[in-house]
Image (tube, rainbow, N blue to C red):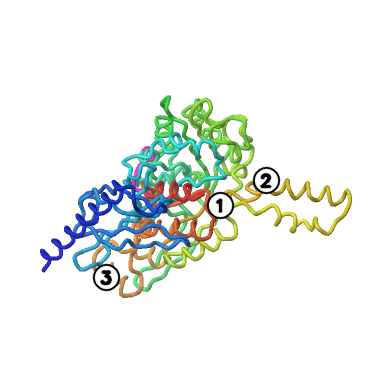
Amino acid sequence: MSTRIATVRRLLRVATFWAAALVAACGGGDASTRLVTVQHSPGDFPSGSSHVEYLFLGEVGEWVALAAEYGLNGGNLVEVPTDTTGLLVRAHSEEHEMLAEQLYLVSPAGEAATATSFSRWMTQDQRIQASALYQITIPGAHDAGMGKIDKCSFYANAKTTQTQDSSIAGMLHNGIRYFDLRPMYAGLDLRVQDREMRLGHYSWVGNTIDIGIYKFTLRNEGCTGYTVAAALDDVRDFMAGSDNREVVILKMSHFQNLRTHDNSSSHFDPADIAELERMVKEKLGAYLLIGNPDFRTAPISQLTASGPKVIVTFDVGGHDGSSGIYSQSDLHLYDEYANKASYDAMKKDQFGKMAVSAQRMDPIPVQEWIDLYLCNTMVGPISEQCYKRAEAAYANQWRLYPYFVLSWTLTQSEHQMIGCTVGTTEPIRLALALAGYACTTLPELGKKANGHLPDVLAEAKAKRRYPNVLYVDQASAQATATAIAINRLH
C-alpha cells in the first residue's frame, strides 16, 4: 500500500512540475502568482518523514496549504502569490502525522532555500541598510552566554539554565544581532572555583522548598557559561572583513558578584564595572559605535559608513556613549517576558503586548493626527500652529514607540524546575513525576517555542505590527529567517 501511495505522489509531483513549467514557458498563468523552486533533501527532515507539504502566508496572516504534497527530494516547483516571501515546509510521516516544520525564505529570483549562513544579511540588503534599527526586526538571543555550561551552584544544572546551544560566534554567523549578556563573578564555594568574569544565568530565589521527600533552601542559584573575554573575542573576530556592514547590539545587564555580594541584591562594584569597561574597549575598540545616542533612528548605512559597528549598553549609570558604552536607557526598551511555561499562554501574553506597544508597519494617516490634535476645531494662528504640531507628530510617529522586544521564550514552572533539579536518578524522577514535579528542561522549552516561530510571522502580517527584536532561546538561523521575512512585509 505504501509503495502505491509513494508512486502516486511521485506521479503527482512530476505532473505538477511539468504543468507549471509549460505555463511558465508559454507565458500564461495568473499575473498575481509566480513559480518558486523549493530546494531540500531528506536529510533536512526528521527520521520517519515520508513527504512534505508547502504553505504560504495568506492575506490575513493565515498559513494556506498548497493542494499537493511532495516527496522529500528538492526541486519541487510550486505556484504561489507573487508577493510570497516565505514558504512553510512541513514534514509528515506516512500516517500524515506532522513531524516538523521549517520556514524557507523565497528569493526575488523565485527560489526557496534555507541559507547555510546569514552572516551578512544586513550588509547585502540595501533596504535594510537604508532603514534605521527602529524600522526593522532583528533576531536576538536571550541569556546569550549560556551556549555551554561551565559550573553551577548546588541546586542548578544545564536542564534549568542552558538557554542556548551554540557559541556567540555560531549565533553571529547564523544572523543573530542582539545579545543579552549577563556578566558575573561566581562564588568561591567548594563547587564553584572560578576567578574569571563569566556570562551567567543566576537569580536569587530566597525560599525553602518542601516536597515531602526532600526539603531544601534556595539562594543565588544558576550556572556560568562562556567567559566574557571569549564572548568579546567572538564578536571582534566576526566584525573583521571589508565586506562587513553589520550592526550588533550587546545588552549587558544583571551584573552579579557573588564573591562579595551573595545576597538578593548582588551587583558589580565600581572596580568590577571598570574591569568590564576595560575588556570591552580592549577587545572591541575598533568596532564600537562612539558618541551617537540616536543610534536607533539613524540609517544603518550611516552607522556603518566606516565599517561594521557594535553597540554596547550597560544597565548601570554613568555611560553616555562617548567611550563606546551607552546606558541601556538609550535603547528605550519595552522588554517584558511572559514568565509562562505554556506556549499558548506565552503567545497570548506576547501578542497582546505587541498589539499595544510594537510599531506599526503602516504609518497612521496624517488626518488621524489632525483629528487627534483637534485642529479642525480651531481657527486663525492657533489652528495653523496646531496643524504644524500634528504634521510634526506624523513625521516622528515611528520614534514614539519603544524598542519592542518580543520575548518568544518559555519559562520553567517551579514544579518543572524542581523536577529537573532534584531528579538525579530514574527512581527519583519517576516519584517526582507522579507527585506533579515532572522535569521539562529549559532547552526543551526553547525548542518548543521556536517550533512556533511561523506564528510570529503570521501575526505580524495579520496585525501589521512588528517587533524590533525577536528574542529567543536556542537561537538559530530560523529566528533570522523569520525576522527577514517580517522585514519583507513592509
Q: CA distance from mark 1 to mark 3?
A: 50 Å
> Which numbered dot is residue 430?
3
**Magenta-colored span:** 163-169
Query: Quick one: label 1 or label 3, which is nearer the N terminus?
Result: 1
Badge nearest the viewer, 1 or 3: 1
Q: Is residue 4 visible?
A: yes
**In the image, what residue occupies the spot 27% across and 70% down?**
430
Q: Nearer the viewer, residue 329 or 297?
A: 297
Q: CA distance from mark 2 to mark 3?
A: 58 Å
Q: CA distance from mark 1 to mark 2?
A: 14 Å
Q: Is residue 352 left or right of residue 103?
A: right
**In the image, what residue occupies the spot 53% across and 27% down?**
305
**Secondary structure of the residue carrying numbered label 2:** loop
Q: Count residues near mark 3 (Cα–Cα under 10 Å), then give few for <14, some for 14-19, many for 20+.
A: some
**Secondary structure of the residue carrying numbered label 3:** helix
**In the image, what residue occupies the spot 48% across and 50% down?**
489
Dominant SS of magenta comes to loop
Q: Are marks 1 and 2 in contact (CB under 8 Å)?
A: no
Q: Is residue 155 visible?
A: no
